[in-house]
Image: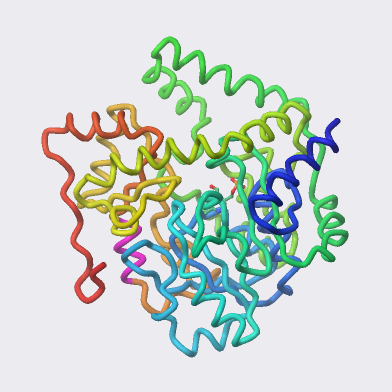
């Protein structure tokens, strides 16, 4: 039954993306497969410093050296026109982010990669419903990593999308090497966590539940937006890369079953949700239309036809204060990628950006809000004594 479901999921994804797809236990495993297959250990990979820290650790686990790209203050994605020639000459590949569903400048990046013989890998975790010129994001590079726990809202799962179908046997072998059976403890957590969440919701016990989860140490990002770096341990892991298992302490953050095989019921759930993605698109667009009226909405979310974004980025002064105030009103904001990875991981583990200002500005001002929760967000913001003030872009980099 499970292999039939797997094939059906891959067929749905193949129809969407127009490319070969391999189902994986998570988006991060798909990304690791892409980096291990299309790049060699020691290669340098250009990526955004304002992405998930898990992505950084996957890049390190693949034995690659991360090189931080200059960003556009307009959307927090790589600014291809700000990348110095010296940086282009140093890198072997580029990884896009498609932050919150806003597309990278993928046409320009692909043209440059083709010209210089670089590998383009796409991170589609936030952008499974995003297109550029009528073509889905994920169908531009050599390979792309999809996450099924974002728009698809599954409790896990991912997929590798790739152009060269001949690579499939090697990819399946590599996937088999890192995948483990789902442990009984994880299976129990798979069932109990959503049940506990439903109970909390039904009884309206958000505050005591939040206190209890924090007291029990079950909130992973309780101390800020980035996970603890643990530099001495990381130094040792980097010395032994490529090796995904050795990077478990970092890569499993927020998703402890990230390389455990999906169960039959999980696969059925993913398939059903994937088939409902068009409905999700309509709900997201509706939320984006409501939120884009807020002062401070980033230009790509505010202008043009609305996209079905994962998050609508607001750019506000005193972001941490606004985030805390929203939390008091029981609106949690996730996917805040601050500080930028070069400030977080230091030059020991990454090549810092040649111009870090836009990334620092974006990272410290962005407040990503969920368009599916637009009503609650608007009520919470409306209830604040002083409404959030839109952030002013750094001089010389205005969006
Ligand atoms: C930008 C980005 N890429 C990749 C991932 C990894 O996806 P997954 O959680 O499915 O492993 C995430 C997870 O949040 C992400 O935010």
Q: Residue 53: x, y in percent?
A: 52, 55
The quarter of the rendered structure image containing the N terminus is: top right
Observer-nearest of 261 and 113: 113
What is the image's colouring?
rainbow
Tell me if residue 360 is in the magenta stretch: yes
Q: Residue 217: x, y in percent?
A: 51, 31
Q: Residue at x 69, y 35 (%)?
A: 271
Question: For the stretch drawn in magenta, what is the main secondary structure?
Answer: helix
**Quarter-wise, where is residue 209 in the image?**
top left
Q: Residue 309: x, y in percent?
A: 43, 47
Q: Residue at x 36, y 72 (%)?
A: 356
Q: How many marks?
A: 0
Q: Is residue 379 left or right of residue 312?
A: left
Observer-nearest of 333 and 171: 171
Q: Residue furthest top?
A: 203
Q: Residue at x 85, y 38 (%)?
A: 3
Q: Residue furthest left?
A: 385
**Quarter-wise, where is residue 391 in the image?**
bottom left
Q: Is residue 104 left or right of residue 146?
A: left
Q: Residue at x 62, y 51 (%)?
A: 146
The quarter of the rendered structure image containing the C terminus is: bottom left
Q: Residue 171: x, y in percent?
A: 81, 59
Tell me if residue 121 is in the magenta stretch: no
Residue range highlighted in magenta: 357-364
Q: Residue furthest front?
A: 134
88 w.r.t. 76: above or below: below
């Amino acid at each position: 039954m499970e292999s039939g479901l797997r094939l059906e999921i891959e067929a749905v994804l193949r129809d969407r993306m127009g490319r070969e797809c391999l189902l994986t236990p998570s988006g991060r495993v798909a990304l690791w497969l892409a980096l291990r297959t299309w790049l060699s250990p020691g290669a340098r990979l250009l990526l955004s410093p304002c992405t998930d820290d898990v992505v950084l650790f996957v890049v390190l686990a693949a034995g690659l050296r991360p090189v931080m790209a200059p960003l556009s203050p307009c959307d927090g994605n790589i600014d291809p026109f700000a990348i110095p020639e010296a940086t282009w000459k140093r890198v072997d590949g580029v990884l896009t982010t498609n932050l919150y569903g806003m597309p990278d400048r993928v046409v320009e990046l692909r043209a440059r990669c083709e010209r210089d013989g670089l590998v383009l890998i796409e991170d589609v975790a936030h952008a499974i419903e995003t297109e550029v010129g009528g073509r889905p994001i994920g169908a531009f590079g050599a390979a792309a990593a999809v996450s099924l726990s974002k728009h698809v809202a599954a409790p896990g799962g991912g997929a590798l999308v790739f152009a060269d179908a001949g690579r499939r046997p090697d990819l399946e072998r590599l996937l088999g090497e890192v995948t483990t059976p789902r442990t009984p403890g994880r299976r129990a957590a798979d069932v109990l966590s959503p049940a506990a969440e439903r109970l909390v919701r039904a009884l309206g016990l958000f505050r005591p539940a939040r206190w209890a989860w924090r007291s029990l140490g079950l909130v992973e990002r309780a101390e800020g937006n980035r996970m603890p770096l643990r530099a001495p341990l990381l130094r040792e892991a980097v010395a032994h890369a490529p090796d995904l298992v050795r990077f478990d302490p970092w890569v499993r953050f927020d998703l402890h079953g990230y390389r455990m095989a999906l169960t039959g019921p999980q696969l059925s759930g993913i398939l059903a949700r994937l088939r409902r993605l068009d409905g999700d698109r309509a709900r997201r667009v509706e939320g984006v239309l409501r939120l884009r009226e807020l002062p401070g909405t980033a230009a790509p979310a505010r202008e043009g036809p609305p996209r079905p974004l994962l998050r609508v980025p607001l750019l506000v002064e005193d972001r941490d204060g606004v985030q805390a105030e929203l939390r008091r009103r029981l609106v949690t904001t996730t996917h805040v990628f601050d500080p930028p990875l070069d400030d977080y991981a230091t030059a020991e583990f990454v090549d810092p950006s040649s111009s870090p200002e836009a990334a620092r500005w974006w990272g410290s001002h962005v407040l990503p809000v969920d368009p599916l929760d637009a009503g609650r967000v608007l009520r919470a913001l409306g209830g604040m004594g002083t409404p959030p003030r839109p952030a002013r872009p750094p001089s010389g980099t205005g969006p």
